[in-house]
Image (spheres, rainbow, N blue to C red):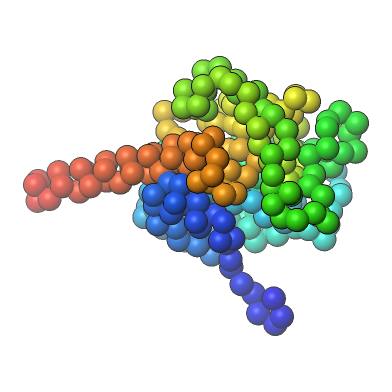
Amino acid sequence: MGLHNFHIAGEKYLRAVTEGAGCLPLVLPSFSDPEILAACVRNLDGLLFTGSPSNIEPHHYSRLPSATPEDHDAKRDAFALPLIRLALEANIPLLAICRGFQEMNVALGGSLHQQLHQTGRFIEHRENKQSDVNIQYGLSHSVAIEPGGILEQACGSEVREVNSVHAQGIDRLGKHLRVEARAPDGLIEAISVDSEGFALGVQWHPEWKVTNNPFYSAIFKLFGDACWHRISMRERDYEQTEKMA
C-alpha cells in the first residue's frame, strides 16, 4: 500500500475466531525465516489460513505458466506452505479457508486447476464482483458431505448449502488427505488430513456471518474445541514438569 508493505487479515476472519471458535486471534507476519516458523509451531495453539485475492504461484505444483501472474503473493507462499507442513507434524489444530484450503493441498503435494471455468467440467464457482457483498457471499450451491470424516461426525451426512467465491480448485489431491465434501459437479470442496489431529480445509467461506449459519458455526466450534484441547494438554505438561522440578 503506497510506499510501505502491510501484513493484514480481514476482520471477518478475526471475528469468526473470537465469536465462532472462542479463541484470541493473532495476525502473523508472512516472514519465512526458519526461526519464525519454528516459533509459530512452538507457541501457538491453532492456525487459521485465510482466503485471499491472491493465488499460489503454480511453480509450487505445476510446470504450466501462471494464468494470473498479476495475482500472486510469493511471500505468503514461502510462509504458508512450510508452516502447514510443520503444523501438521506438530499436530497443531489447523483450519484452512479458500486460498488456505488450496495451500493445504499444495503443501502436501497436490495440484490445482488454475481456471475452473475454462475446463468445461464445472459449474460457475466465481462470484459476480459487481454484486453486493452479501450476494457475493450468499449461499450459492450445495455440498455433499462424505461419510466417515470430520464434517460427517460433527454435522451429519446431509447435503449443505455454501457460498462460492473462487476461480481455482483442487485438481490432484495431496498425500494423506481425505475428501470431506464435494460440489454437485464433483469438485472437491472440503478436505482433512488422515491423522489423529484436527486439520480441516474448506473451499467456501464459513467465516462469513458465522454466527448466523449453524453449519459455519459448527466448523469454527470444531476448530475452537481442538485449540482449547491443545491448550489443556500444554498446561497439563507444564504442571507435570513443575512437579518434577
Toward the viewer: 228 or 19?
Answer: 19
Residue positioned 26% across, 43% down in the render: 232
Q: Is residue 183 above or below residue 106?
A: above
Which corner quadrant of the image does residue 43 belong to?
A: bottom left
Note whether residue 16 is visible. yes
x then y, percent, for residue 121: 86, 28
Toward the viewer: 242 or 208?
Answer: 208
Toward the viewer: 33 or 70?
Answer: 70
Residue closest to the far bottom = 3
Which corner quadrant of the image does residue 18 belong to?
A: bottom left
Residue closest to the far top = 147
Which corner quadrant of the image does residue 191 belong to?
A: top right
Q: Is residue 204 left or right of residue 91?
A: right
Q: Is residue 11 left or right of residue 56?
A: left
x then y, percent, for residue 15: 50, 56
x then y, percent, for residue 210: 53, 46
